[in-house]
Image (spheres, rainbow, N blue to C red):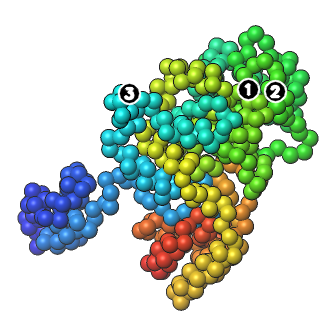
């Protein structure tokens, strides 16, 4: 039989009620692509010519964007490849509300232009009173670029050789800083830097001292570094990149610096990420002396690093809203994780070899490398890892010693049923 002649024409298939509705929801291009693919399948004899519309409907994407939601069963709380922090429901609602026209830069009472993101900025100021003033840019790297450009372009940035960090994917902070036109003035050694190394380097050409939290590695043994309070008296601005975005000390992560303590110790400016331990959207936080923040705000580069209204909304809701999923995942109760893992293993054990094993989670996101988070996981045969990843919903576990581990630390309890369903469909 010649299937080609019977394959319905594109405009006829597109007239299908379901596909017309989909074109309104997803846009015509995606719907047309689904139809063209189904027509080709009919020509190839893979489906019947009469099934083209049904096949096109079945193969439509769920949404107009191709990024897919993923269940993070890796046990890594801030998984960079999975988009770092998971937003709270309050933050999600805030960014949905900000999606249309919004008063992000407009005063409704006066009808005049207003400071962009003023609600977010005052929430951040209130969260870290020691900050003096605050600014928000696109990410931690942007915060660092803005700070070093405004304070030290054409001048020296003094930095310890022990703090020359590569943050990931080949990006190195020293190169980032040099790209701004600042000169790096390296002091000390990989393992030891002393106050005299800094005092010897400070001079008329100094733009700032930069301290970078070595967030993704540890140096042990014969080491020393100079605390912020010792640098604060040298007469030049001290910029501290704390990385993680903790606003106040967290007893769970005693080695992570926080913005409040760092500012109290005398830092002129603190930079941090919004989507690490703070648990918010991707953003770069700048907190510090009023006069410095004002310089940053007025720098032409600030406009290029300006943050989106959706980010501002989600960040404010993260600052004032309920405990974040990040906070909760870090503190997940091991006994609770074990009980959930046991229930899931029991629900699938008739179909697949499933056991409950101890599993150490991690903070991730290049943070707290020495901290492990004891918990529990469901262990499945390794072949399940790929099947679960390409399933719907996608479930990403961790492969360890020939097994696929599903660690529930970052999985909201109401998604346990989805995991059971995903495993059973992968049998
Ligand atoms: C993560 C990190 C950065 C980069 O922040 P982004 O928000 O990813 O741009 C810079 N410095 C330190 C110390 C970090 O940990």
Does any atom of ligand 1 lie closer than 8 Å to the CB of label 3? no
> Could you say whether the residue bearing mark 3 is in a helix, strand or loop?
strand
Relative to 289, does residue 340 appear above or below in the rendering? below
Q: Which residue is mark 1?
A: 238
Specify whether 232 is left or right of 303.
Answer: right
Work out whether mark 3 precedes mark 1 in sequence or the reverse, and give the earlier one: 3
**The quarter of the displayed image where residue 54 is located:** bottom left
Residue receiving disc 2:
231
Q: Quadrant of residue 21?
A: bottom left
Q: Residue furthest front?
A: 109
Q: Viewed as shown, does residue 67 lie left or right of 264?
A: left
Quadrant of the image containing the N terminus: bottom left
Q: Are marks 2 and 1 in contact (CB under 8 Å)?
A: yes
From the top left corner, tell me how far across and down residue 78 is, in percent: 60, 54
**Crowding near the residue tagged with mark 3, few <14, some 14–19, many ≥20 C-alpha atoms within 10 Å:** few
Q: Observer-nearest residue: 290 or 397? A: 290
């Amino acid at each position: 039989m010649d299937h080609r002649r019977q394959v319905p024409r594109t405009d006829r298939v597109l007239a299908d009620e379901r596909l017309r509705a989909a074109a309104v929801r997803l846009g015509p291009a995606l719907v047309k692509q689904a139809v063209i693919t189904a027509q080709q399948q009919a020509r190839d004899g893979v489906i019947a010519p009469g099934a083209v519309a049904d096949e096109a409907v079945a193969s439509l994407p769920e949404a107009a964007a191709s990024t897919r939601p993923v269940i993070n069963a890796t046990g890594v709380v801030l998984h960079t490849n999975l988009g770092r922090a998971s937003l709270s429901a309050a933050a999600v609602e805030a960014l949905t509300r900000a999606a249309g026209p919004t008063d992000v830069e407009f005063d409704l009472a006066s009808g005049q232009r207003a400071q962009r993101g003023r609600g977010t900025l005052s929430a951040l100021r209130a969260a870290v009173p020691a900050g003096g003033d605050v600014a928000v840019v696109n990410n931690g790297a942007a915060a660092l670029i803005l700070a070093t450009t405004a304070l030290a372009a054409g001048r020296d940035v003094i930095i310890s050789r022990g703090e020359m960090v590569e943050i990931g994917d080949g990006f190195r902070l020293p190169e980032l800083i040099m790209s701004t036109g600042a000169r790096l003035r390296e002091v000390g050694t990989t393992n030891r830097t002393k106050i005299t190394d800094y005092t010897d380097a400070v001079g008329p050409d100094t733009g700032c001292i930069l301290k970078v939290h070595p967030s993704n590695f540890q140096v042990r043994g014969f080491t020393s570094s100079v605390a912020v309070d010792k640098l604060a008296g040298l007469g030049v601005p001290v910029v501290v990149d704390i990385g993680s975005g903790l606003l106040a000390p967290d007893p769970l992560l005693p080695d992570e610096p926080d913005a409040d303590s760092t500012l109290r110790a005398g830092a002129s400016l603190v930079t941090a990420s919004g989507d690490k331990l703070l648990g918010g959207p991707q953003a770069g936080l700048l907190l510090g002396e009023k006069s410095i923040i004002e310089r940053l705000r007025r720098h032409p580069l600030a406009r290029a690093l300006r943050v989106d209204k959706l980010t501002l909304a989600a960040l404010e809701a993260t600052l004032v809203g309920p405990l974040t999923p990040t906070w909760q995942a870090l503190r997940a109760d091991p006994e609770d994780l074990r009980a959930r893992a046991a229930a899931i293993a029991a629900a699938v054990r008739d179909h697949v070899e499933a056991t409950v094993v101890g599993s150490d989670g991690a903070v991730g996101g290049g943070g707290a490398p020495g901290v492990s988070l004891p918990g529990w996981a469901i262990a499945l045969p390794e072949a399940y890892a790929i099947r679960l990843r390409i399933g719907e919903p996608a479930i990403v576990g961790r492969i360890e010693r020939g097994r696929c581990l599903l660690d529930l630390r970052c999985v909201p309890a109401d998604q346990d049923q989805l995991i059971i369903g995903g495993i059973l469909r992968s049998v």
